[in-house]
Amino acid sequence: MRTSSFKNSLLKALDGEIIERLRLRPVKFELKHEIEYPGNPINHLYFLEEGMASMTATFKDGSQVEVGTFGYESVIGVSALMGTRKSLNRVYTQIAGHGYSCQVEDARREFRLGGYFQLLALRYVQAQLVQSMQTAGCNAKHNFEQRLARWLLICADRAHIDTFKISHEFLADMLGGRRPTISTTAGILKRKGLIEYTRGEIRILDVPGLTKTSCECYLIIKHHLDNYTEFDRAIPV
């Protein structure tokens, strides 16, 4: 399998020998496909090629809030490489797509070699931490218009699309708000000509305008997720 054929950032950066040792298998991700659930064993790592998944914190009353996103740059289940046995969060697809999976033990074996796979996996963890920290700060500091613009842009980047089938209820869950707040905020972005919104579907019309409406958090998250494989490639000795 040629690494140049991959869209996933990490797989694309690996050489063919590592890819063979990971023993990848193709996977299809339907909408709302449950990848991880709190307390369930992590048996596989997943590498998205297309589509997008959310990691959420789930509360006793059944409500949830998004704490991370996964797109073409992702390694879902990467915490298992550091010893985690059971998932701490819910992870499921919100935009259908496809990718690859590998057995956790194959990935752990490769990780323990201390080579390039380990280096990239740790860099991805760092990029995910940046995303989670920036999102937490954003939710506390910035207004809902900025937060919705940031969320839409990150979704578009991670899935390489500009149109999402998504409900106000779902957006309220992802952003930790209420449905009326989402409706009002989406209406503001629509009147500005930044998005088009019909029942259950949002289309981004003006990326530069939406970027300007968003806060600095979007570009910080985008930079780390887009570039984590391209930072200094030297492996410390």
Image (cartoon, rainbow, N blue to C red):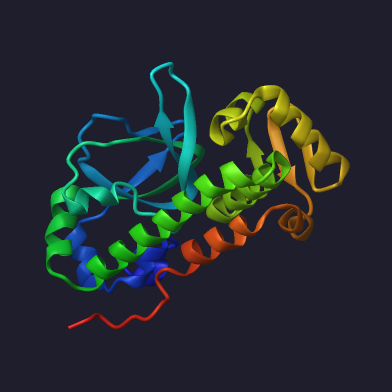
Q: Is residue 81 left or right of residue 233?
A: left
Confirm whether residue 71 shows in the render: no
Residue at 56% across / 62% down in the picture?
A: 220
Quarter of the image with the C terminus in it: bottom left
Judging depth in this view, the residue of 98 and 54 nearest the camera is: 54
Of the pair 72 and 226, the residue shown nearer to us:
226
Question: In this view of the protein, which residue sits in the foreground, 146 or 49?
Answer: 146
Q: Residue at x 74, y 28 (%)?
A: 183
How many numbered marks, from 0 up? 0
At 42% from the left edge and 60% from the top edge, which residue is drawn?
Answer: 127
Name the image quarter holding the N terminus.
bottom left
Residue 172 lies, in percent from the top left, at: 61, 29
**Residue 34 quadrant:** top left
Residue 62 in view: yes
| Residue 110 left/right relative to 48 | left
Residue occupying the point 54% across, 49% down:
137
Q: Quadrant of residue 116?
A: bottom left
Extreme residue in the top direction: 61
Q: Position of residue 176 (x, y in %)?
A: 56, 31
The image quadrant of residue 180 is top right
| Place of residue 154 in the rendered image (x, y in percent of width and height, measured from the top left) | 58, 52
Q: Where 143 sits versus 22, above or below?
A: above
